[in-house]
């Protein structure tokens, strides 16, 4: 019997290591990676010039493209792993704009209605892998990868996003979630940690309920 194809999405804050984990998991499992679409949002220049006037337009553009990608991945003939979920656009980044006063209450309500309707129609992935990390870890990893356009990212901003991530993941019920303690795991330089993550993902996909990372397991896989 041909194994049922799977759709796994990796979520987490800026700099946590989503793209790297997607690449390594796909190499290990023989699945296809799907990274964030490359393309210029035609509203970005206007948005950065006047965030409150253009936040709604910019976020609708982003989520439209993310929803199209989500649909394509659901219909993909083989197993795939996605770098960043459609949920993060709405639950983290659009909500952050709203909380900071850069998206009006009316625009945010209209955006949420569109997002909730379409995500319910499309259906969820089989699993969300959530990489959880402290601000100190995020800042260190952002510095190490040396992207000049990320130099302005502040610890306060990452902290605000972390709070939104925790609120979102605590209430997320569309599909199972595997939370990876990224502060304690170095899957780039430690093959044992990648082995452990793969083991936990496979357990979750098999329907096991209590799949967590225990400190002694992490230590034993060093």
Image: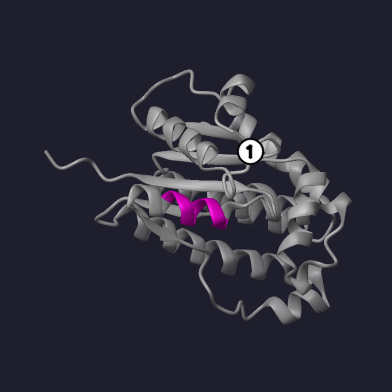
Q: Is residue 85 above or below residue 213?
A: below
Q: Quadrant of residue 50?
A: bottom right
**The magenta stretch spans residue 43:** no
The quadrant of the rendering that contains the N terminus is top left
Point out residue 8 in the picture as x, y percentages from the top left corner: 42, 45
Q: Residue at label 1? A: 185
Q: Is residue 133 left or right of residue 80?
A: right
Residue reaching furthest to the left:
1
Point out residue 12 in the picture as x, y percentages from the top left corner: 63, 47
Q: Is residue 178 above or below residue 57?
A: above
Point out residue 188 in the picture as x, y percentages from the top left corner: 58, 50
Q: Can see residue 103?
A: no
Report the predominant secondary structure element of the magenta stretch: helix
Q: Is residue 186 left or right of residue 175?
A: right
Q: Is residue 110 left or right of residue 127?
A: right
Q: Is residue 48 left or right of residue 117?
A: right
Magenta span covers which residues? 19-25
Residue at point 70%, 55% (across, down): 14
Point out residue 142 in the picture as x, y percentages from the top left corner: 75, 59
């Amino acid at each position: 019997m041909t194994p049922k194809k799977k759709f796994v999405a990796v979520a987490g804050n800026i700099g946590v290591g989503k793209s790297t984990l997607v690449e390594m998991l796909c190499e290990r499992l023989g699945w296809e990676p799907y990274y964030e679409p490359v393309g210029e949002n035609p509203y970005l220049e206007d948005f950065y010039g006047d965030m409150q006037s253009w936040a709604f337009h910019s976020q609708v553009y982003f989520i439209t493209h993310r929803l199209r990608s989500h649909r394509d991945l659901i219909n993909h003939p083989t197993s795939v792993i996605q770098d960043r979920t459609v949920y993060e656009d709405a639950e983290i980044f659009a909500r952050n704009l709203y909380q900071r006063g850069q998206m009006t209450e009316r625009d945010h309500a209209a955006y949420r209605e569109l997002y909730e309707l379409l995500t319910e129609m499309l259906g969820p992935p089989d699993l969300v892998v959530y990489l959880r990390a402290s601000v100190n870890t995020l800042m260190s990893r952002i510095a190490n990868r040396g992207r000049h356009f990320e130099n302005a990212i502040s610890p306060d901003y990452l902290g605000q996003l972390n709070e939104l991530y925790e609120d979102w993941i605590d209430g997320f019920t569309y599909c199972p979630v595997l939370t990876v303690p990224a502060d304690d795991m170095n899957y780039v330089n430690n093959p044992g940690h990648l082995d452990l993550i793969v083991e936990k993902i496979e357990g979750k996909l098999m329907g096991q309920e209590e799949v967590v990372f225990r400190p002694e397991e992490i230590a034993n896989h060093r």
